[in-house]
Image (spheres, rainbow, N blue to C red):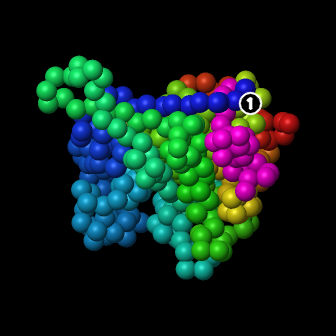
């Protein structure tokens, strides 16, 4: 099964909500919870440099969404009584990973925020069919279509962009970065998916987009699920980061150095949400299926995959870990 035409629209929203979706606008809820998390982190020595970075850059209300995500992730570690090192130099030049945690295993963890793309912002339009909304009510829609004149203004383009952003965490400026070849540690890239498709990426009940980023269209096709092609016009099925044949130069280093890619989709900005709303994808180049699950048990923020169709998510890993 293949997708010939895809259109995903955001709900009717006010201009402020459109700004939230399309430009990473800071909601009161996110600001309040992140500020609370920052205050709680003042109780631990290892978060001192993270706190300093936030304050040096103007505080919670002015820093980039990616730095606010670092604060919330650090607080999630704190709530689990995890001792961490922030901006740890793992031995790859002057670059560093965001967190190093030591428990049963050593974990190197790097965060990346998939922010709204320029093409995604261009795909938003005023929406008021037949002038039905009362005066003062503004609504917008975002259309990401396979047949868009600009192929980047499509779901396919957003998936490829997410793969590129993840890849930049292991390969940048023509050379490997941040993560060394693993020896005694396990490596994770954690993706803040708030900007994917302009509406937060895949919803909590549907992990298909994340499966396709990690394992490619074949993973979905073998379950008779819709998948994407790139380029959008008569292209080939999208190849996952953990799949042979991916054309991105960084993919070699993802497959060689990263044990897990995590996808986080916050909505409420509350305690335990990062743990409860993380879908993780294991790298079959480094981990067998059984070892992947066993290793994941020792992750600082471990929780079994609990998206809407757990069997589907496990099945995606089964395919990558040895299925055809």
What range of the chain is rendered magenta? Answer: 225-247
Report the residue marked by disc 1: 221
Q: Is residue 289 visible?
A: no
Q: Residues within 10 Å of mark 1 (few under 14, many from 20)?
A: some
Residue nearer the viewer, 215 or 264: 215
Q: Quadrant of residue 290?
A: top right
**Residue 83 at what x, y percent from top left?**
48, 59
Q: Residue 223 placed where, x, y %?
A: 74, 26
| x 60%, y 49%: residue | 160
Which of the two residues, 214 or 290, is positioned nearer the viewer here?
A: 214
Number of labels in the image equals: 1
Residue 34 placed where, x, y %? 30, 50
In the image, residue 35 above or below residue 123: below
Identify the residue at image location x=74%, y=30%: 221
107 left or right of 237? left
Is residue 241 inside the magenta stretch?
A: yes
Q: Pinpoint residue 23: horizontal percent, then vertical percent.
A: 34, 49
- Asked if 317 appears above or below 88 in the picture, the reply is above
The residue closer to the viewer here, 29 or 276, is: 29
Q: Compared with residue 247, is residue 208 higher up or lower down, i.e. above or below?
A: above
* Residue found 27% across the figure and 31% down from its top: 139
- Residue 223, compared with residue 97, is above or below; it is above
**The C terminus appears in which quarter of the rendering?**
top right
- At horizontal 77% and vertical 41% (from top left) the residue drawn is 320
Q: Report the residue that reaches farthest toward the left.
A: 135
């Amino acid at each position: 099964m293949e997708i010939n035409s895809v259109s995903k629209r955001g709900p009717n929203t006010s201009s402020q909500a459109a700004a939230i979706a399309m430009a990473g606008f800071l909601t009161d809820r996110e600001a309040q919870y992140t500020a609370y998390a920052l205050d709680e982190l003042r109780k631990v020595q290892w978060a001192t440099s993270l706190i300093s970075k936030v304050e040096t850059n103007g505080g919670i209300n002015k820093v980039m969404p990616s730095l606010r995500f670092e604060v919330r992730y650090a607080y999630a570690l704190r709530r689990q009584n995890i001792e961490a090192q922030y901006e740890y130099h793992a031995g790859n030049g002057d670059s560093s990973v965001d967190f190093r945690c030591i428990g049963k295993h050593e974990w190197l963890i790097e965060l990346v925020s998939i922010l709204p793309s320029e093409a995604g912002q261009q795909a938003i339009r005023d929406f008021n069919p037949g002038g039905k909304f009362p005066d003062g009510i503004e609504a917008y829609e975002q259309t990401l279509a396979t047949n868009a004149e600009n192929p980047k203004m499509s779901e396919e383009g957003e998936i490829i962009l997410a793969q590129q952003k993840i890849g930049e965490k292991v390969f940048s400026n023509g050379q490997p970065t941040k993560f060394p070849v693993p020896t005694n540690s396990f490596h994770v890239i954690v993706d803040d998916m708030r900007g994917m498709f302009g509406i937060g990426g895949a919803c909590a009940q549907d992990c298909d987009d994340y499966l396709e980023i990690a394992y490619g269209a074949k993973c979905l096709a073998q379950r008779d699920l819709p998948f994407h092609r790139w380029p959008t016009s008569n292209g080939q099925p999208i190849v996952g980061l953990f799949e042979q044949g991916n054309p991105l130069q960084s993919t070699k280093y993802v497959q060689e150095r990263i044990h897990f890619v995590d996808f986080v989709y916050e909505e409420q900005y509350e305690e335990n949400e990062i743990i409860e709303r993380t879908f993780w994808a294991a790298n079959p180049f480094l981990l067998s299926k059984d070892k992947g699950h066993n290793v994941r048990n020792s992750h600082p923020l471990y929780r079994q995959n609990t998206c809407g169709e757990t069997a589907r998510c496990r099945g995606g890993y089964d395919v990558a870990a040895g299925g055809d």
